[in-house]
Amino acid sequence: MVTREQVISPAKVLDLPPLFLPVQIRIHRVCPEQEFSKTMKTTLGFVIAAIFWAGTLLGQEKQQADFVTWKQHVGIPGPSGWRVNVIQPDPKDHGPDGFNHHDWDADGDLDVLVHFEEGGYSRLYFNPGKDRIRELWTDYIQLERHGKCEDSGIGDLDADGDIDYIANGGHVYFNPGAKDLSDSKKWIKMTLFKSEARTPVVSDVDGDGLNDLIVGAKAWYRQPTENKHDATQWKRYELGEANWPMSCIINDIDGDGDDDIIVQERKNQGTFYYENPGQEKVSEPWPVTMIDAEKNGMFMALGDVNGDGRLDLVKASGLGAVHIYLRTNDMGAPVYKKIEVPPPAQPGSVKVKPKPKGVAILELNGDPTHPEIAIIPEYEAQLWYLTMSGDGMSPKDWTNTLMDMPSPESRKKMDNAFLVDLDGDGDLDIATTEENGGWGVIWFENPAKN
């Protein structure tokens, strides 16, 4: 039997924090067994609710803690001299997910245009200058909202000499020029379509002297000669199939004098290129040549990594390794020797298996004939770079080196590696976006002294 003064406290029984002690069942009368059973069912309901409430609040507290961890480590160099600088943090988890750099205000410093995936907007951050480059960038404009966005690009799409901006493939923002640059309302928005189309790239596809827009690595829009801000004047042409492109690179890969399109596709097609069929057939679907059908790869970079004068490819493989495609011929369809380099051992603070995501080719050790390959992991791991010895034709010829920046485990989800000299000291830094750990828009400062 339960007496009048008996109190059942699920919070106390479960040893929950003091916050939950008020969660009690107070029974005001003596009850028979049937009512006692009902009472216990009610108590169980409160127990479940208390557990759920506790989990939710503790999860929120942990997330808030994650979002401020960056403050303890920002700007502090690691053992190798590399440091992480924050352009703008992401305290509300709006998910910055792309990085475009250009000197938009023509002051000699590189500015940054970033889109926010979950936030659904894009911002142009103006470089504060060398004296305040490591501080937060507080001068920015926010363009008209476009909705959820996972990719963006830049280029001159109305032939006025100014660099325009493309969000999610279909939303084009035309630069109003130097006079009105800082007025976000003066940027003219043109929507070609609203569905997602990754990796928007600006290039003169048809060779008429006007830049066109490639979207989703599967189609392109021809820039009209007149009424360039009118979406109905932009005609669409299909290239072929691409399900989830991560990289879309313009290059004359077969050496026949016109630009082809190299695609790293994540889900279905793998790594391939569209062969430019020539100006007469450019509006038709382009022939496809497969390089590697492996699925689940991330970003890819193009560059000469072994100093033989040929352009190689480097891909962050979905299998967890780095794949290096060393080109072995000079002309015609490319022939590659594929090298697989496993990731390095991570610091003890890193509890996940490193998964390569971002890729960049740059000089780090003073030998410009053999550049290094920098890798950004996707989740909570330390950046690293690969250095070549010998002829590079064996995995044993490649050495992994950690870049030793503080608190790698606090950077929860990063993007591609963008090479840019933000501090104007003559060497390339590595910029990216960090989506889920609060770091936001960041750049890894190259410690080299030139």
Image: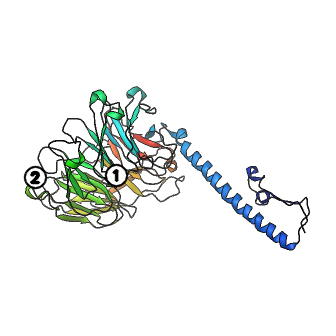
User: Between 81 and 133, which is closer to the camera in this rendering?
Assistant: 133
Locate residue 83, reporting x and y percent.
Answer: 45, 39
Q: Is residue 147 visible?
A: yes
Mark 1: amino acid: Val
Locate residue 191, reporting x and y percent.
Answer: 30, 47
Q: SS of the residue at dot 1? A: strand
Locate residue 194, reporting x and y percent.
Answer: 33, 53
Identify the residue position indicated by label 1 in the image: 359
Other residues around mark 1 within 10 Å, as few (<14) / some (14–19) / many (≥20): many
Q: Is residue 76 left or right of residue 162?
A: right
Task: From this view, report whether residue 142 is shown above or below residue 28.
Answer: above
Residue at the image position 46 percent from the left and 52 percent from the top: 413
Other residues around mark 2 within 10 Å, as few (<14) / some (14–19) / many (≥20): few
Q: SS of the residue at dot 2? A: loop
Task: From this view, report whether residue 135 is shown above or below residue 345.
Answer: above
Q: Given this view, does label 2 or label 1 mark the residue nearer the observer? A: 2
Q: Are marks 2 and 1 in contact (CB under 8 Å)?
A: no
Q: Which of pointers 2 and 1 lies earlier in the amino acid sequence?
A: 2
Check residue 257 in the rendering and tell me which mark sits there, or answer none: 2
Q: What is the spatial separation of the Cα atoms under label 2 and label 1, in whole angstroms?
A: 27 Å
User: Between 358 and 371, which is closer to the camera in this rendering?
Assistant: 358
Mark 2: amino acid: Gly
Residue at the image position 12 percent from the left and 48 percent from the top: 207
